[in-house]
Image: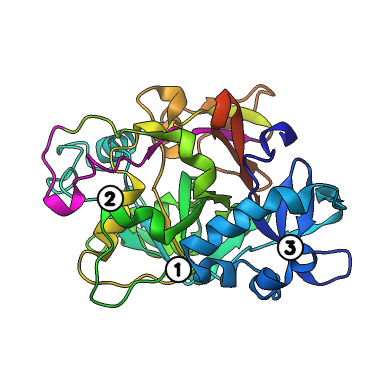
Amino acid sequence: MSDVFGVQNLPYGSAIWRDGRRHTVVRVGSSALSLTTAAPSEFAELFADGTLDRLLAAGRATWTDVRALLPSLIDGAELVPLADLRMVLPFTVADYVDFYASEHHATNVGRLFRPDEEPLKPNWKHLPVGYHGRAGTVVVSGTPIRRPHGQTRSADGTVSFGPSRRLDIEAELGFVLGTASRLGDRVSVAEFAEHVFGVGLVNDWSARDIQAWEYVPLGPFLGKSFATSVSAWITPLDALAAARVPAPPRDVAVLPYLDDSAHPWGLDIAVEVWLNGELISRPPFAGMYWTPAQMLAHLTVNGASVRPGDLFASGTISGPRPDERGSLLELSWGGAEPLTLDDGAVRTFLQDGDEVVLRATAPGVGGDRIGLGEVSGRIVPA
Protein backbone atom coordinates (compact mmCIF):
# COMPACT_ATOMS: atom_id res chain seq x y z
CA MET A 1 0.00 0.00 0.00
CA SER A 2 2.99 2.32 -0.49
CA ASP A 3 1.06 4.34 -3.11
CA VAL A 4 -1.33 5.59 -0.40
CA PHE A 5 1.53 6.94 1.72
CA GLY A 6 2.59 9.78 -0.56
CA VAL A 7 3.34 13.43 0.19
CA GLN A 8 -0.27 14.35 0.96
CA ASN A 9 -0.25 11.83 3.80
CA LEU A 10 3.14 11.79 5.64
CA PRO A 11 2.27 9.97 8.88
CA TYR A 12 4.65 10.11 11.84
CA GLY A 13 6.13 7.26 13.82
CA SER A 14 9.02 6.15 15.99
CA ALA A 15 11.58 3.53 14.98
CA ILE A 16 14.79 1.90 16.04
CA TRP A 17 17.13 3.35 13.40
CA ARG A 18 20.20 1.82 11.80
CA ASP A 19 22.36 3.34 14.54
CA GLY A 20 20.45 1.37 17.19
CA ARG A 21 18.82 4.50 18.61
CA ARG A 22 15.19 5.53 18.63
CA HIS A 23 14.33 8.13 15.97
CA THR A 24 11.19 10.12 15.19
CA VAL A 25 10.36 9.29 11.57
CA VAL A 26 7.98 10.30 8.81
CA ARG A 27 6.77 7.75 6.29
CA VAL A 28 7.08 8.22 2.53
CA GLY A 29 5.77 5.23 0.59
CA SER A 30 7.58 2.14 1.85
CA SER A 31 10.48 4.17 3.30
CA ALA A 32 11.04 6.62 6.12
CA LEU A 33 12.99 9.80 6.84
CA SER A 34 14.53 10.40 10.27
CA LEU A 35 13.40 13.73 11.68
CA THR A 36 15.77 13.17 14.58
CA THR A 37 18.68 13.71 12.18
CA ALA A 38 17.10 15.71 9.34
CA ALA A 39 15.07 18.38 11.19
CA PRO A 40 16.54 21.91 11.01
CA SER A 41 17.90 23.48 14.18
CA GLU A 42 14.71 25.36 15.09
CA PHE A 43 12.80 22.05 15.28
CA ALA A 44 15.61 19.68 16.31
CA GLU A 45 14.64 19.60 19.98
CA LEU A 46 11.15 18.35 19.10
CA PHE A 47 12.56 15.08 17.76
CA ALA A 48 15.67 14.64 19.90
CA ASP A 49 14.21 11.85 22.07
CA GLY A 50 12.95 9.85 19.08
CA THR A 51 9.26 10.02 20.03
CA LEU A 52 6.31 12.24 19.12
CA ASP A 53 5.93 13.42 22.73
CA ARG A 54 7.47 16.88 22.32
CA LEU A 55 5.77 17.49 18.98
CA LEU A 56 2.39 16.65 20.52
CA ALA A 57 2.96 19.15 23.32
CA ALA A 58 4.08 21.91 20.92
CA GLY A 59 0.56 22.65 19.67
CA ARG A 60 -1.31 23.32 16.46
CA ALA A 61 0.85 26.14 15.06
CA THR A 62 4.01 24.05 15.34
CA TRP A 63 2.29 20.98 13.88
CA THR A 64 1.34 23.09 10.85
CA ASP A 65 4.86 24.52 10.47
CA VAL A 66 6.54 21.12 10.66
CA ARG A 67 4.13 19.56 8.17
CA ALA A 68 4.74 22.43 5.71
CA LEU A 69 8.49 21.80 6.00
CA LEU A 70 8.38 18.05 5.34
CA PRO A 71 8.30 18.08 1.48
CA SER A 72 11.51 20.11 1.33
CA LEU A 73 13.20 17.80 3.86
CA ILE A 74 12.15 14.72 1.90
CA ASP A 75 13.24 16.07 -1.48
CA GLY A 76 16.64 14.55 -2.22
CA ALA A 77 17.03 13.06 1.26
CA GLU A 78 18.27 9.56 1.98
CA LEU A 79 15.24 7.44 2.86
CA VAL A 80 15.54 4.14 4.68
CA PRO A 81 13.33 1.15 3.74
CA LEU A 82 10.77 0.29 6.40
CA ALA A 83 12.01 -3.30 6.24
CA ASP A 84 15.27 -2.10 7.80
CA LEU A 85 13.54 -0.50 10.79
CA ARG A 86 11.81 -1.76 13.92
CA MET A 87 8.75 0.31 14.71
CA VAL A 88 7.98 1.10 18.35
CA LEU A 89 5.13 2.85 20.16
CA PRO A 90 5.27 6.36 18.67
CA PHE A 91 4.25 8.34 21.76
CA THR A 92 3.91 7.91 25.50
CA VAL A 93 0.25 7.07 26.14
CA ALA A 94 -0.79 9.38 28.97
CA ASP A 95 -4.39 8.20 29.29
CA TYR A 96 -6.79 5.99 27.37
CA VAL A 97 -10.57 6.27 26.94
CA ASP A 98 -12.69 4.05 24.72
CA PHE A 99 -16.10 5.04 23.42
CA TYR A 100 -19.09 3.09 22.08
CA ALA A 101 -20.05 5.37 19.19
CA SER A 102 -21.51 3.07 16.52
CA GLU A 103 -25.29 2.69 16.68
CA HIS A 104 -25.08 -0.50 14.62
CA HIS A 105 -22.52 -2.06 16.94
CA ALA A 106 -24.32 -0.98 20.11
CA THR A 107 -27.62 -2.31 18.76
CA ASN A 108 -26.10 -5.66 17.79
CA VAL A 109 -24.42 -6.06 21.18
CA GLY A 110 -27.63 -5.10 22.97
CA ARG A 111 -29.56 -7.75 21.09
CA LEU A 112 -26.91 -10.37 21.88
CA PHE A 113 -26.36 -9.53 25.56
CA ARG A 114 -29.90 -8.41 26.47
CA PRO A 115 -32.28 -10.24 24.10
CA ASP A 116 -35.35 -9.49 26.23
CA GLU A 117 -34.74 -5.72 26.44
CA GLU A 118 -34.50 -2.77 24.10
CA PRO A 119 -31.03 -3.04 22.51
CA LEU A 120 -30.03 0.56 23.25
CA LYS A 121 -30.11 1.90 26.79
CA PRO A 122 -32.09 5.16 27.27
CA ASN A 123 -28.92 7.27 27.55
CA TRP A 124 -27.23 6.05 24.37
CA LYS A 125 -28.54 8.71 21.96
CA HIS A 126 -28.09 11.51 24.49
CA LEU A 127 -24.35 11.13 25.13
CA PRO A 128 -21.30 9.27 23.82
CA VAL A 129 -21.00 6.29 26.16
CA GLY A 130 -17.42 5.37 27.09
CA TYR A 131 -15.15 3.78 29.64
CA HIS A 132 -11.75 4.62 31.05
CA GLY A 133 -9.16 2.10 29.83
CA ARG A 134 -5.60 1.19 30.80
CA ALA A 135 -2.86 3.31 29.21
CA GLY A 136 -0.08 0.94 30.30
CA THR A 137 -1.32 -1.91 28.11
CA VAL A 138 -1.58 0.05 24.86
CA VAL A 139 0.95 -1.65 22.56
CA VAL A 140 2.32 -0.95 19.10
CA SER A 141 1.13 -2.86 16.04
CA GLY A 142 2.84 -6.22 15.67
CA THR A 143 3.07 -6.94 19.39
CA PRO A 144 1.93 -10.54 20.14
CA ILE A 145 -1.30 -10.68 22.14
CA ARG A 146 -1.31 -13.23 24.97
CA ARG A 147 -4.66 -14.85 25.66
CA PRO A 148 -5.85 -13.49 29.02
CA HIS A 149 -7.05 -15.35 32.10
CA GLY A 150 -10.08 -14.32 34.09
CA GLN A 151 -13.32 -15.31 35.78
CA THR A 152 -16.21 -16.55 33.67
CA ARG A 153 -19.65 -17.97 34.37
CA SER A 154 -21.11 -20.88 32.44
CA ALA A 155 -24.73 -21.24 31.37
CA ASP A 156 -25.49 -23.32 34.47
CA GLY A 157 -24.15 -20.58 36.75
CA THR A 158 -20.79 -22.16 37.58
CA VAL A 159 -18.04 -19.58 38.12
CA SER A 160 -14.54 -20.66 37.07
CA PHE A 161 -11.11 -19.21 36.34
CA GLY A 162 -9.02 -19.84 33.25
CA PRO A 163 -8.06 -18.63 29.78
CA SER A 164 -10.66 -16.71 27.80
CA ARG A 165 -12.47 -18.90 25.28
CA ARG A 166 -14.22 -16.02 23.52
CA LEU A 167 -11.32 -13.76 22.55
CA ASP A 168 -12.39 -11.06 20.13
CA ILE A 169 -11.33 -7.98 18.20
CA GLU A 170 -12.74 -4.49 17.97
CA ALA A 171 -11.88 -2.51 14.84
CA GLU A 172 -11.64 1.12 15.95
CA LEU A 173 -10.20 4.51 15.13
CA GLY A 174 -8.02 6.23 17.71
CA PHE A 175 -7.37 9.96 18.22
CA VAL A 176 -4.09 11.22 19.68
CA LEU A 177 -4.28 14.41 21.72
CA GLY A 178 -1.59 17.05 21.78
CA THR A 179 -2.48 20.47 23.18
CA ALA A 180 -3.36 20.23 26.87
CA SER A 181 -6.38 21.76 28.58
CA ARG A 182 -6.61 23.05 32.14
CA LEU A 183 -8.41 21.14 34.87
CA GLY A 184 -11.90 22.63 35.12
CA ASP A 185 -12.03 23.79 31.49
CA ARG A 186 -14.03 22.22 28.68
CA VAL A 187 -12.96 21.48 25.11
CA SER A 188 -15.80 22.41 22.77
CA VAL A 189 -16.62 20.69 19.48
CA ALA A 190 -15.28 23.82 17.76
CA GLU A 191 -11.88 23.32 19.44
CA PHE A 192 -11.41 19.71 18.35
CA ALA A 193 -8.66 20.42 15.80
CA GLU A 194 -6.73 22.58 18.27
CA HIS A 195 -6.25 19.59 20.56
CA VAL A 196 -6.18 16.50 18.32
CA PHE A 197 -2.86 15.89 16.60
CA GLY A 198 -3.70 12.84 14.55
CA VAL A 199 -5.42 9.53 13.96
CA GLY A 200 -4.43 5.87 14.05
CA LEU A 201 -6.16 2.52 13.78
CA VAL A 202 -6.85 0.71 17.06
CA ASN A 203 -7.73 -2.90 17.88
CA ASP A 204 -9.28 -3.03 21.34
CA TRP A 205 -8.92 -6.76 22.01
CA SER A 206 -11.81 -8.09 24.10
CA ALA A 207 -12.35 -11.24 26.15
CA ARG A 208 -16.12 -11.53 25.74
CA ASP A 209 -16.66 -14.29 28.31
CA ILE A 210 -14.74 -12.37 30.98
CA GLN A 211 -16.51 -9.15 29.97
CA ALA A 212 -19.99 -10.70 30.15
CA TRP A 213 -19.51 -11.77 33.78
CA GLU A 214 -17.80 -8.63 35.08
CA TYR A 215 -19.36 -5.69 33.22
CA VAL A 216 -22.46 -5.23 35.45
CA PRO A 217 -22.70 -2.74 37.14
CA LEU A 218 -19.48 -0.80 36.37
CA GLY A 219 -18.64 -1.81 32.82
CA PRO A 220 -15.53 -3.23 31.09
CA PHE A 221 -12.50 -4.07 33.22
CA LEU A 222 -10.29 -7.19 32.89
CA GLY A 223 -12.02 -8.25 29.68
CA LYS A 224 -10.48 -5.20 28.00
CA SER A 225 -7.42 -4.12 29.97
CA PHE A 226 -4.98 -6.88 28.94
CA ALA A 227 -4.04 -5.27 25.58
CA THR A 228 -5.02 -2.57 23.09
CA SER A 229 -3.06 -2.37 19.82
CA VAL A 230 -2.42 0.93 18.06
CA SER A 231 -0.86 1.63 14.68
CA ALA A 232 2.84 2.49 14.53
CA TRP A 233 1.91 5.39 12.23
CA ILE A 234 -0.11 8.42 13.32
CA THR A 235 -1.74 10.27 10.41
CA PRO A 236 -1.89 14.04 11.04
CA LEU A 237 -5.40 15.41 11.29
CA ASP A 238 -4.51 17.86 8.49
CA ALA A 239 -4.05 14.94 6.09
CA LEU A 240 -7.74 14.02 6.55
CA ALA A 241 -9.22 17.37 5.47
CA ALA A 242 -10.81 15.80 2.37
CA ALA A 243 -12.29 12.97 4.43
CA ARG A 244 -14.55 15.16 6.58
CA VAL A 245 -18.27 14.43 6.19
CA PRO A 246 -21.42 15.22 8.19
CA ALA A 247 -22.52 12.72 10.80
CA PRO A 248 -25.54 10.51 10.01
CA PRO A 249 -28.95 12.03 10.77
CA ARG A 250 -29.87 11.87 14.46
CA ASP A 251 -33.37 11.25 15.71
CA VAL A 252 -32.81 12.61 19.24
CA ALA A 253 -31.86 16.24 19.83
CA VAL A 254 -28.52 16.65 21.61
CA LEU A 255 -27.70 19.14 24.35
CA PRO A 256 -25.96 22.35 23.21
CA TYR A 257 -22.43 21.26 24.17
CA LEU A 258 -22.76 18.27 21.78
CA ASP A 259 -24.25 20.26 18.89
CA ASP A 260 -21.76 19.79 16.05
CA SER A 261 -23.94 21.09 13.21
CA ALA A 262 -21.52 23.98 12.59
CA HIS A 263 -18.41 21.82 13.07
CA PRO A 264 -18.99 18.46 11.37
CA TRP A 265 -16.24 15.95 12.15
CA GLY A 266 -17.59 12.77 10.64
CA LEU A 267 -14.80 11.02 8.71
CA ASP A 268 -15.14 8.95 5.56
CA ILE A 269 -12.65 6.23 6.44
CA ALA A 270 -12.99 2.75 4.96
CA VAL A 271 -11.69 0.06 7.32
CA GLU A 272 -10.80 -3.52 6.47
CA VAL A 273 -10.57 -6.45 8.89
CA TRP A 274 -8.27 -9.31 7.84
CA LEU A 275 -8.12 -12.65 9.66
CA ASN A 276 -5.25 -14.99 8.74
CA GLY A 277 -4.81 -13.22 5.42
CA GLU A 278 -8.50 -13.19 4.48
CA LEU A 279 -10.67 -10.08 4.28
CA ILE A 280 -13.68 -10.72 6.52
CA SER A 281 -15.26 -7.28 7.01
CA ARG A 282 -15.32 -3.69 5.71
CA PRO A 283 -16.58 -1.41 8.52
CA PRO A 284 -17.37 2.20 7.42
CA PHE A 285 -16.39 4.92 9.90
CA ALA A 286 -18.60 7.47 8.11
CA GLY A 287 -21.66 5.81 9.65
CA MET A 288 -20.62 6.40 13.28
CA TYR A 289 -23.43 8.03 15.24
CA TRP A 290 -21.13 10.11 17.45
CA THR A 291 -18.23 12.06 15.96
CA PRO A 292 -14.79 12.36 17.54
CA ALA A 293 -15.42 16.06 18.22
CA GLN A 294 -18.47 15.11 20.28
CA MET A 295 -16.50 12.41 22.07
CA LEU A 296 -13.83 14.92 23.10
CA ALA A 297 -16.44 17.50 24.13
CA HIS A 298 -18.19 14.94 26.31
CA LEU A 299 -14.92 13.64 27.74
CA THR A 300 -14.11 17.15 29.04
CA VAL A 301 -17.55 18.62 29.78
CA ASN A 302 -17.19 17.89 33.51
CA GLY A 303 -13.88 19.78 33.59
CA ALA A 304 -11.64 16.75 33.11
CA SER A 305 -8.38 17.92 31.57
CA VAL A 306 -6.51 16.43 28.62
CA ARG A 307 -2.76 16.28 28.11
CA PRO A 308 -0.29 15.41 25.35
CA GLY A 309 -0.37 11.70 24.62
CA ASP A 310 -3.95 11.09 25.71
CA LEU A 311 -5.60 8.58 23.42
CA PHE A 312 -9.31 8.09 22.89
CA ALA A 313 -10.86 5.52 20.59
CA SER A 314 -14.19 5.35 18.82
CA GLY A 315 -15.37 1.96 19.94
CA THR A 316 -16.12 -0.79 17.43
CA ILE A 317 -16.88 0.46 13.93
CA SER A 318 -19.82 -1.44 12.44
CA GLY A 319 -22.14 -0.76 9.54
CA PRO A 320 -25.69 -1.91 8.82
CA ARG A 321 -24.70 -4.92 6.69
CA PRO A 322 -23.42 -8.25 8.05
CA ASP A 323 -20.12 -7.82 6.14
CA GLU A 324 -19.57 -4.42 7.81
CA ARG A 325 -19.37 -5.62 11.40
CA GLY A 326 -16.18 -4.76 13.26
CA SER A 327 -16.06 -7.61 15.80
CA LEU A 328 -16.24 -11.38 15.73
CA LEU A 329 -19.00 -11.18 18.34
CA GLU A 330 -21.19 -9.63 15.65
CA LEU A 331 -19.75 -11.44 12.62
CA SER A 332 -20.47 -14.84 14.23
CA TRP A 333 -23.56 -13.53 16.03
CA GLY A 334 -22.32 -14.53 19.45
CA GLY A 335 -20.95 -17.81 18.11
CA ALA A 336 -24.28 -19.00 16.70
CA GLU A 337 -23.27 -18.33 13.07
CA PRO A 338 -19.61 -19.40 12.67
CA LEU A 339 -17.46 -17.95 9.90
CA THR A 340 -16.00 -20.37 7.36
CA LEU A 341 -12.76 -19.06 5.88
CA ASP A 342 -11.48 -19.78 2.38
CA ASP A 343 -9.17 -22.54 3.65
CA GLY A 344 -12.09 -24.30 5.33
CA ALA A 345 -11.21 -23.17 8.84
CA VAL A 346 -14.19 -22.26 11.02
CA ARG A 347 -14.11 -19.42 13.54
CA THR A 348 -16.46 -17.97 16.09
CA PHE A 349 -13.77 -16.33 18.25
CA LEU A 350 -9.98 -16.19 17.97
CA GLN A 351 -7.80 -19.26 18.29
CA ASP A 352 -4.14 -19.34 19.29
CA GLY A 353 -1.98 -18.49 16.28
CA ASP A 354 -4.62 -16.36 14.57
CA GLU A 355 -3.41 -13.05 13.18
CA VAL A 356 -5.72 -10.03 12.82
CA VAL A 357 -4.75 -7.05 10.65
CA LEU A 358 -6.74 -3.82 10.37
CA ARG A 359 -6.18 -1.55 7.37
CA ALA A 360 -7.90 1.65 6.25
CA THR A 361 -7.94 4.34 3.58
CA ALA A 362 -9.55 7.76 3.32
CA PRO A 363 -10.15 10.34 0.57
CA GLY A 364 -7.21 12.64 -0.05
CA VAL A 365 -6.88 15.91 -1.89
CA GLY A 366 -7.58 15.62 -5.63
CA GLY A 367 -9.50 12.37 -5.44
CA ASP A 368 -6.57 10.13 -4.52
CA ARG A 369 -6.80 8.01 -1.39
CA ILE A 370 -4.44 8.03 1.53
CA GLY A 371 -3.70 5.12 3.83
CA LEU A 372 -3.72 4.77 7.58
CA GLY A 373 -0.97 2.63 9.04
CA GLU A 374 -2.16 -0.92 9.65
CA VAL A 375 -2.46 -2.46 13.09
CA SER A 376 -1.75 -6.16 13.53
CA GLY A 377 -1.52 -8.71 16.30
CA ARG A 378 -1.12 -12.47 16.58
CA ILE A 379 -2.67 -14.47 19.43
CA VAL A 380 -0.25 -16.48 21.57
CA PRO A 381 -1.34 -19.06 24.17
CA ALA A 382 -2.31 -18.10 27.70
Residues shaded magenta:
251-276
Which mark identifies residue 294?
Answer: 2
Q: How packed is label 3: few (under 14 Cα within 10 Å), some, or many (20 or more)? A: many
Marks 2/1 in contact by CB < 8 Å: the verdict is: no
- Residue 120, image quadrant: top left
Viewer-closest of 182 and 157? 182
- Residue 139, image quadrant: bottom right
Viewer-closest of 304 and 111? 304
Marks 2/3 in contact by CB < 8 Å: the verdict is: no
Q: How packed is label 1: few (under 14 Cα within 10 Å), some, or many (20 or more)? A: many
Badge 1 marks a residue whose secondary structure is: loop
**In the depicted structure, whether residue 16 falls above or below residue 142:** below
Q: Is residue 182 left or right of residue 382?
A: left
Q: Earlier in the sequence, mark 2 or mark 3?
A: 3
211 in magenta: no
- Who's the residue at 50% across and 35% down the image? 348
**Distance between mark 1 and mark 3 Cα atoms:** 30 Å
- Residue 140, image quadrant: bottom right
**Distance between mark 2 and mark 1 Cα atoms:** 22 Å
| Residue identifier under label 3 | 35
Badge 2 marks a residue whose secondary structure is: helix
User: Which label lies toward us, 2 or 3?
Assistant: 3
Which mark identifies residue 379?
Answer: none
User: Which label lies toward us, 2 or 1?
Assistant: 2
Q: Earlier in the sequence, mark 1 or mark 3?
A: 3
| Residue identifier under label 1 | 134
